[in-house]
Image (cartoon, rainbow, N blue to C red):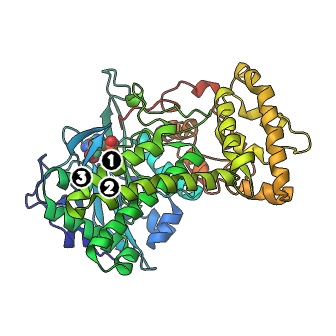
Amino acid sequence: MRDLRFDNRFVRELPGDPEEGRHVRQVHGACYSRVEPTPVRAPKLLAWSREVADLLGFDAADVRSQRFAEVFGGNALLPGMEPYAACYGGHQFGNWAGQLGDGRAITLGETINPRGQRWELQLKGAGPTPYSRSADGRAVLRSSLREFLCSEAMHHLGVPTTRALSLVATGEQVVRDMFYDGRPRPEPGAVVCRVAPSFIRFGNFEIFAARGEESLLARLIDFTIERDFPELAQAEPDPARRRIAWFEEVCRRTAVLMAHWMRVGFVHGVMNTDNMSILGLTIDYGPYGWIDNFDPDWTPNTTDAGGRRYRFGHQPRIAHWNLWQLANAIYPVIRAVEPLERALVAYADVHEAEYRRMMQAKLGLADWRAGEQADDGLLEQLQRLLQRGEMDMTLFFRRLADVDLEAPSLAVFEEAFYDPSARAAVEDELVGWLRAYAARLRIDGVPGAHRRAAMNRVNPLYVPRNYLAQQAIDAAEAGNVGELEALLEVLRQPYVEQPDSERFAARRPDWARNKAGCSMLSCSS
Ligand code: AMP
Ligand code: MG
């Protein structure tokens, strides 16, 4: 397997923990602790992303070599790798949780690919670090497969996300109490290699603010701008104005990300500030889920079932709350309230504009009309009907392009209904809505074929539905990764109807309605 070129700026330019070893501790005055992955018994490559391999400069022969499994399972290092675990804190479910840090993630290094792009390689499930607290530093196959699959699916859907290079089985068992019912059982372990320009989170800044380590806070901010926002560093030479421009950009990217999640029906499940990427990427795939029947109140995370803080429809507001925490954290360096507040107000404006723009495209409208023919009203009414009618979000929007505008009916939506009585309750109103929609489209006057093609480019047919991921997990645990490969293959082109792939477009089957992993997930991973 070929070597990669590394340029490890994070460990080179920022202060590290002087203490060595993996023992659990509070780490002060440092951004990271140097720690190597703990070797595993029998690393074996289960799956990989050819797009990410290509991005890094690996070919198929590299990936299939045993050395690849050794490196990306945590048993060997490539020349130039300088592994570390980052120190960060976070607000979990609304409360300050103190030091968290990479408890099972270990960054191997920052590689510069043949195109000159910087990519951080990070193993998840690579063994204990100083930030592991009471946990084991490992990850089970089911959660690793979910992270691997969804990262790549999100990328192909056009949603900003961290990527995944590989899924490696460790040949070791990991004990987890999946249902938190006091009956832990051993499960196969795995390691994912995640890839992103940066894994810095809101929590990396919050920890220094909480501890009053202000000079370190300023260093990390300026480092982040220089390494991860080079366009800002160039455009704004004044350090104070540059930091404000940076926060504005973080707000903007987060607003765009939330609009994407809402348009595809993704529910993150654990939007704690330590799970918020400073680059505005989807990060830390845990008990996430995909909306089947449209329901803004739904959350897949059983740990959050009580308050539903992180439910689907609440995500944009939670991101805003998280940005407030980031603003509070960086205030000691910015020392001005007004520009931070302005950026937070702009967040809501950007989010609304982006959300509208995306929904306009999903509906196939040529523009967004305010006032008398208000499209806001059309959208709101539709969402109420989708919820009451328990309609599948993905299938509804995909089939919407096929509605006959001359004689609108529910014929094209047969597969999108989950429940006959919920359907009966909305049937008439929905047909009424379709007539209003058809009338609205006639105002645009866009030729039908043109509009349908445009709608199909933004309304995916295939998303990594929870039950599909669970089927891939069940097969992989039984030793068959073919199911995962087939699913990933289809998800590479989520907007293109593919032959013999109907089963990957099907709505959630009845058996999956209340099955663990399909509609409910715990944080146990
Ligand atoms: P999460 O909510 O999954 O993003 O994790 C919150 C914190 O717990 C992070 O600091 C993780 O690194 C840590 N953590 C989660 N699972 C483990 C584990 N199995 N071993 C060590 N640390 C973990
Ligand atoms: Mg996390």
At x 14% / y 65%, what residue is drawn? 215
Task: Identify the amino acid type marked 1.
Answer: Thr
247, above or below 263, in the image: below
Tell me the mark number nearer the camera, choosing from 3 and 2: 3
Mark 1 and mark 3 in contact? Answer it, CB < 8 Å: yes
Quarter placement of the N terminus: bottom left
- For mark 2, what is the residue? 201
| Residue 139 located left or right of residue 354 | left
Reading the image, the residue beneath label 3 is 206
The answer to whether marks 3 and 2 mark residues whose Cβ atoms lie closer than 8 Å is: no
**Which residue type does callout 2 highlight?**
Arg
Tell me which amino acid carries mark 3. Answer: Glu
Residue 67, image x and y in percent? 36, 64
What residue occupies the far top of the structure in this picture? Answer: 421
Above-or-below relation of 392 to 61: above
Label drawn at residue 273: 1
Count neighbours of disc 2 (C-alpha within 10 A) and say few if under 14, some if 14 to 19, many if 20 or more: many
- Kind of element beneath mark 2: loop
Question: Taking the image as drawn, is residue 165 in sight?
Answer: no
* Within-10-Å neighbours for mark 3: few <14, some 14–19, many 20+: many
